[in-house]
Amino acid sequence: MRLISILFKETRPQFLILTLVCYLVGIGTASHALGGFGRIPPGHAILALIGALLSHVAVNVLNDYFDYRSGLDLRTQPTPFSGGSGILPQGLMSSKQVLSMGIISLLIVVAIGIYFLVVRGWGLLPIGLLGILVIVLYTPLVTKTPALCLIAPGLGFGPLMVMGTHYVLTGQHDWLAFWASLVPFFLVSNLLLINQFPDAEADSSVNRRHLPIVIGKKASAYVYAAFALSAFCWVVVTTLGGMLPPGALLALVPLPLALVTIRSVIRSAEDRDALIPLLAKNLIYTLATPFLLGVGLLVA
């Protein structure tokens, strides 16, 4: 039981909620395209969810492995939202065991992807290949390239996850899924961006190069504001333009919390202690917005 508990903690389960809400957006677009939730094939839906969760697990675990090997874990002052699982620094698992766990998770994702290629067609291949590249290269390469570091998280949880889920459930690509996927794209990119603020000094010591390091926290706060506002503006524009159904407007409910958080982040960008509660507020609206978008699409 203790081993299972350690393995579970290493997946960083508190962050896997993000996978569930982004997956729900794909369920919503597929339901809308198929003419009802009841027409979604349940076996494929379950398998797609397993693949999505294990993709996130693979990223988390491999990131833990590389951060420990680089010495970053020993230099970072953890927050509830950043700093790794703590499993390796505490000696609860060896680095070899963590690496094996990450590789096994990724191999299962690949196996699920191959199954869907067989039953749904080759249209999934570009999404699958790009997803694997993001998982494998995230820590070694992406975190050292500011632009990629900004957009890669949103790409993974937005277009790749939403459009991938939509494709395996419907058997075809649809602009509806792409339009909807840009909401989690902006929000998840922002989630990782603001979580980098408290770790900027430690990250810099191991040659990471994300925006808070390269352009500073104050300037990065304005990028954060732009991405957050873009998510909500996109909901309005696509709904008024008929690209998303009216139910998508439900995603605007967290907007007041987002506006308060944006203003506070700009004011407190350089104050680590003041930022910690803002990370929590950011997480709340980052999870609530795609969840409500998915619900709105299902209702529509």
Image (tube, rainbow, N blue to C red):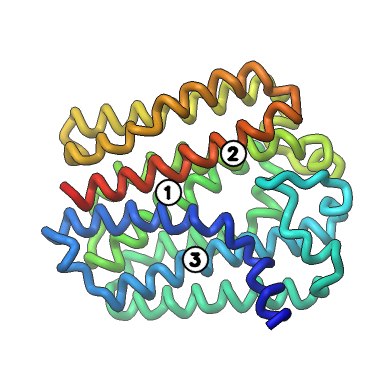
Quadrant in which residue 67 is drawn: bottom right
Q: Which mark is residue 280?
A: 2
Mark 2 lies on a secondary structure that is helix
User: Label 3, label 2: how many angstroms apart (C-alpha)?
Assistant: 22 Å
Q: Is residue 130 left or right of residue 143?
A: left
| Image coordinates for residue 188, horizontal then vertical, percent | 51, 43
Given this view, does label 2 or label 1 mark the residue nearer the observer? 2
| Image coordinates for residue 217, horizontal then vertical, percent | 70, 25
Q: Residues within 10 Å of mark 3 (few under 14, many from 20)?
A: many
Mark 3 lies on a secondary structure that is helix
User: Label 1, label 3: how many angstroms apart (C-alpha)?
Assistant: 14 Å
Q: Which mark is residue 158?
A: 1
When the figure is inspected, residue 294 is found, relative to residue 30, above or below; the finding is above
Q: Is residue 23 left or right of residue 41?
A: right
Residue located at (35% from left, 65% from top) = 124
- At label 2, the amino acid type is Ala
Residue located at (41% from left, 52% from top) = 22
Q: Are marks 2 and 1 in contact (CB under 8 Å)?
A: no
* Residue corresponding to mark 3: 53
Q: Is residue 7 left or right of residue 18?
A: right
When the figure is inspected, residue 194 is found, relative to residue 2, above or below; the finding is above
Q: Are marks 1 and 3 in contact (CB under 8 Å)?
A: no
Q: Residues within 10 Å of mark 2 (few under 14, many from 20)?
A: some
Residue located at (68% from left, 83% from top) = 1
Q: Does residue 99 appear in this view?
A: yes
Q: Does residue 136 appear in this view?
A: no
Residue located at (65% from left, 48% from top) = 142
Given this view, does label 1 or label 3 mark the residue nearer the observer? 3
User: Label 2, label 1: how many angstroms apart (C-alpha)?
Assistant: 21 Å
